[in-house]
Image (tube, helix red, strand yellow):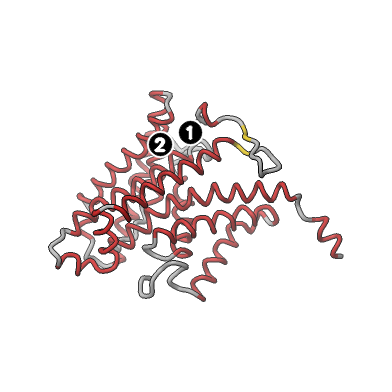
Amino acid sequence: MFTDFINSLPPWGLVEAQMFNGLQQGMLLALISTGLTIVYGTLGVLNVAHGALYTLGAYAGFVAYQATGSFVLAIGAGALGTLVIGLVIERGIIRYYYKRPDEDQIIVTFGLGIIIVESIRAFFGGTSQNMPTPGWGQGASQLGFLQYPFPLYKIETIALSAIILLIFYLVLYRTRLGLVVRAGIEDSGMVSLLGINVFRAFFVVFAIGAMAAGLAGVINAPITAPTPDGGEKFLVFSFVVVVLGGVGSFPGAIVGGLIAGEIMTLTSLFYPSLSEVMLYVAMALILIFRPRGLFGQAGRV
């Protein structure tokens, strides 16, 4: 019986490839989730429109690519477009809800998400858009430690996500703005008493969070074709990642994203229908045994 079990296992080369797929998905989820967790940890706003901002970034990148043929400009358009929309949303709506009940914040961001998604659907229709892989990402690469070739663009996606996360880290941990933001996460009232306009920092934080979602959308567009509803799945996954890593924790979002990516890809190798189920099982176990998440602090749940 044991021999039959061993023979039923997939070859090791395939397991390696799935683990690398998990790394790619995990880095993408980490990128999306950092925006969500920073906004919630700092502002206390559960931004349900985060998935719609992912979709908006993907479509902004798609339009820029159609106009210029440059994927670099497409990434810039996705980032800039969602950054500007984030600023407008925060100044125009969200700042009036900082002191409102959580239910009000959820309802207003849920409505914003619907408006964004339906506006995209009205302009582009409900079908998926074809975002080609850039020329510098086509083909496969034979990495020395993998038995099978791996898509070059997925490798570049890992690198792009890592670079962007590093920039976010430097902003949060090596600048005065980051110091104010991190202090605001711990105690925004105390920061205000020190004479610092913490809400000005919050204004920037919300825009950066929106930009993180938009960047993830445009980077992932050649892998998962943009659709108006494409951000919904990533919104749900991002919530799970935030729970795994801990609310308001930047390192937690990265580690949680990597764990989520590996759980889904490795489970899909053995039981494809259970890949997402196992992700929620992991979340349930974290909530039972460590409610604040792997890197979260007690009381911030």
In the image: residue 257, left or right of residue 168 = right
Q: How far across and how far down the image is residue 35, in percent? A: 37, 53
Front residue of 223 and 182 = 182
Q: Which residue type does callout 1 highlight?
A: Gln
Quarter of the image for residue 276 reads: bottom right
Inter-mark Cα distance, 2 to 1: 8 Å
Residue found 51% across the figure and 35% down from its top: 222
Say what secondary structure mark 1 lies in.
loop
* CB contact under 8 Å: marks 2 and 1: yes
Residue 23 located left or right of residue 210: right
Circle 2 residues within 10 Å: few <14, some 14–19, many ≥20 = many
Query: Can you tell which mark lies on residue 129?
Result: 1
Three-letter code, disc 2: Tyr
In front of the other: 235 or 169: 169
Label 1 crowd (10 A; few <14 / some 14-19 / many >=20): some
**Residue 18: where, in percent of width, then height?**
64, 49
Q: Residue at x 46, y 41 (%)?
A: 160
Q: Residue at x 45, y 65 (%)?
A: 243
Asked if residue 172 is positioned above or below residue 300 in the image, the reply reads above
Tag 1 or tag 2, which sits nearer the N-term? Answer: 2
- Residue identifier under label 2: 59
The residue lying furthest to the top in this view is: 68
Q: Is residue 300 above or below residue 30?
A: below
Report the side of 92 relative to 233 (left or right): left
Q: How many marks?
A: 2
Q: Position of residue 89 (x, y in %)?
A: 25, 49
Q: Looking at the picture, how far across and down is residue 7, in whole percent?
A: 83, 55
| Local SS, label 2 | helix
Please state, as top left, top right, bottom left or bottom right, where the C terminus lies in the image.
Answer: bottom left
Q: Quadrant of the N terminus?
A: bottom right
Looking at the image, which residue sits at the far left? 195
